[in-house]
Amino acid sequence: MENNFLITTGGSGGHVIPATILYDHLSKKANLLITTDKRGSKYLNKDFYLFEIIDTPKLNNIIFLPPNLIKVFFLIFKSLFLLKKKKIKKIISTGGYMSLPVILAAKFLGLKIFLLEPNQVLGRGNKFFLQSCAKIFCYSKEIKNFPEKFKDKMVIINPLVKKSIYEANLSLKKRDKFNLLIVGGSQGADIFDKKLKDSIKNISKDFPIKIIQQTSEKNILLLKNFYFKNNIENIIFSFTKKFTQIIQQADLCITRAGASTLAELSVLNTPFIAVPLPTSKDNHQFENANFYKDNNCCWLIEQKYFEKEIENFFIDIFKKKNDYLSKKENLKKLNHQNTWSNNNQKILKAINKQSIAN
């Protein structure tokens, strides 16, 4: 594999976290650089990842379209200069409009382009560059909106998760309470803060539970007071770098359906109730959750039914342990042979194969 490699990403954690994992997979084989917009840079620790800012504007507002197009044109030249200066030979894009200038510059220079699609719906950015890419890394062959004529470009890998997830200690410690983890994701989930409290209070009367909940800063005190008043043990936080350890404590998780979060829960063999964000682009969160539901690894509740159905879900899970245990077993089967090493070999093999072929 040639030495100088660029990973282009940006925006939300759904794009940037997979980029950091790719960086870790390739770090022993290449000199690496990440490009991201300012929004995505908050997910990157400058002590671990070498990155440059290419702050691509959105092109979906017709009023600001002319100045934003001029800015994109300028950023293409900035990307050309960066790619030449760093002697980049290959790039990987994790999708999104943020990567547009870098990929266009790479096309102009005739560089080898790889794509990553972390969701179960082909993103618009990836679809736009599908014809130009050498290969696209996907988590499933059944990606929605994927053109049949490009299916030979697919390289199926296991969902990208941090190495620390694979190294996590999965030995079960006997607990006197059932640990319920509630995760809103990088875009937050006020619905969990507002609509779950009464159901949790009711369930706690019959079942000993501990709540571990990620929320926004503004809601921490409110939730702590509520759980304290109702004598429910809790850990409430907004952001933590020790999220792997947090997930390890969970017996069950209620979560949005970002690809990275679901992949981590899956590898850690933690059953989950997925509540897809209804405003996610192309409804990709629903399709992400549906992939696991089709494999009988999770429960799925659409947001519009959440308040009405969640307490019944709790009752079924707590009273009918067979379904819960079945989902744990199916997660284990789904991740059979899913290791950091196996995924690493698949990624490197696809990239090296393209190098030899060209």
Image: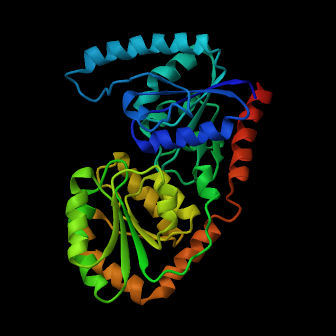
Occupied quadrant, residue 227: bottom left
Residue 269 x, y percent position in the rendering: 56, 68
How many numbered circles are shown? 0
When the figure is inspected, residue 32 is found, relative to residue 24, above or below; the finding is above
Which quarter of the rendering shows the N terminus? top right
In front here: 19 or 113? 19
Q: Is residue 304 visible?
A: no
- Would residue 147 appear left or right of 70 to someone viewing this image? right
Q: Is residue 105 visible?
A: yes
When the figure is inspected, residue 266 is found, relative to residue 69, above or below; the finding is below
Q: Residue at x 40, y 89 (%)?
A: 319
Occupied quadrant, residue 137: top right
- Would residue 310 appear left or right of 270 to someone viewing this image? left
Residue 312 x, y percent position in the rendering: 30, 82
When the figure is inspected, residue 241 is found, relative to residue 291, above or below; the finding is above
Residue 90 x, y percent position in the rendering: 64, 25
Residue 239 x, y percent position in the rendering: 37, 50
In front here: 183 or 334? 183
Q: Residue at x 51, y 71 (%)?
A: 297
